[in-house]
Amino acid sequence: MKERCSKRTFIMPTALTTATNLYLSDLAPNTTQSEIRAMTVACAAVDGINLAQGVCDTDPPHPVVEAAITAIRSGHNIYTRLDGIAPLRAAIAEKFATFNGITVDPDREVLVTSGATGALQAALLALLNPGDECLVLEPFYGYHVSTLRSQRVVPVIVPLEAPDWVLDLDRLSAVVTPRTRAIILNSPSNPSGKVFSQPELELLADFAIKHDLFVFTDEMYEYFIYDGARHSSIAAPSRSLGSPKPSRSPGGDSGILQPMHAGCRLLDTSTISPTYAPPRPCNMVQPQDCWHCQVRSTKSSRLNTSPNAMTFVLR
């Protein structure tokens, strides 16, 4: 096609894309808003009480708030190094050692990401390929399955029996195939509230070793346990990945990823960037025990006065 202007001739470029190439990806038709956020929208429409989304109704730790304000006012608002700033990684490693009993190298085995979902996304990119299968225990957290599907990893759902959600190794063994590469463990679990016991974790660890599987662990609620239950981490530095997301303030959290070093390199080329933290982040990690105990006590007293709400939240 030619277009004339002021006696000069311009050659219009031929379109490289035809109408037959303009179509949605295979993933798009089945990609929808999460049920959690859909419930939030529906709740807001009728001015209801939202028990669907984990919106914390307590103030975040004041040392964190003040440190963030100070960092912003001091001009600390640029990109960080790919794995997170060194003092924060060192504090996270100390937290792993003191609370989880896991020794990690902050320079090679800790990544700070934009939320726990970002940590899972990075880990999947580093370790799994399209068409691989990952076992998911049901009830499951929706974002785990959607994140797997976004990487074209096949989630294989393994139901657990209510009301105790006991680990069933026979069911797990029945669905293992040559394409099974990993299993996702969420303990304490969202939405069931299931806290896997130490014997169950040992059985699951033996199962993973037997079938040569990666274990991705989401331990977001590790501080929010009740009725004498005790949280234990299955994570082992050489074989499994942990992505705990301690709840500080909704939308303002960072994921913590304990990866093989290959994950660090891959993260640098992905779109998942670590969130910025103030240059003195230790206060974010060290006082968490007392703060989470305070929040746990507050929520427990509120749930005890509203048994219906407790049943809805935990189940």
Image: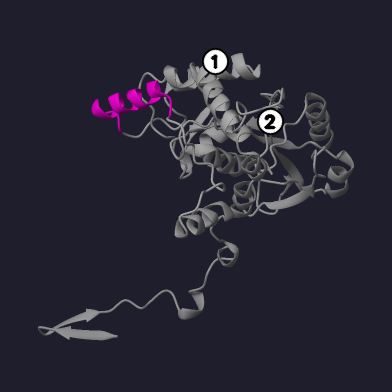
Mark drawn on residue 94: 1
Nearer-the-camera pick, 193 or 115: 193
15 within the magenta span: no
Which residue is the extreme one toward the front?
305
Q: Is residue 231 left or right of residue 274?
A: right
For marks 1 and 2, give the one nearer the viewer: 1
**Considering only vertical position in the picture, is 287 above or below 68?**
above
The region drawn magenta spans 60-77
Q: Position of residue 99 (x, y in %)?
A: 61, 17
Mark 1 residue type: Glu
Q: In percent of the image, x 39 and y 28: which residue is there?
A: 277
Q: Residues within 10 Å of mark 2 (few under 14, many from 20)?
A: many
**Splitting the image into 4 quarters, where does residue 181 fall?**
top right
Q: Is residue 74 left or right of residue 91?
A: left
Q: Is residue 35 visible?
A: yes
Callout 2 secondary element: strand
**Residue at the spot of label 2:** 240
Q: Is residue 2 left or right of residue 207?
A: left
Which residue is the extreme one toward the left?
6
Q: In percent of the image, x 49 and y 16: which residue is there?
A: 286
Q: Position of residue 23 (x, y in %)?
A: 51, 73
Mark 2 residue type: Ser
What's the magenta bit mostly, secondary-structure-wise?
A: helix
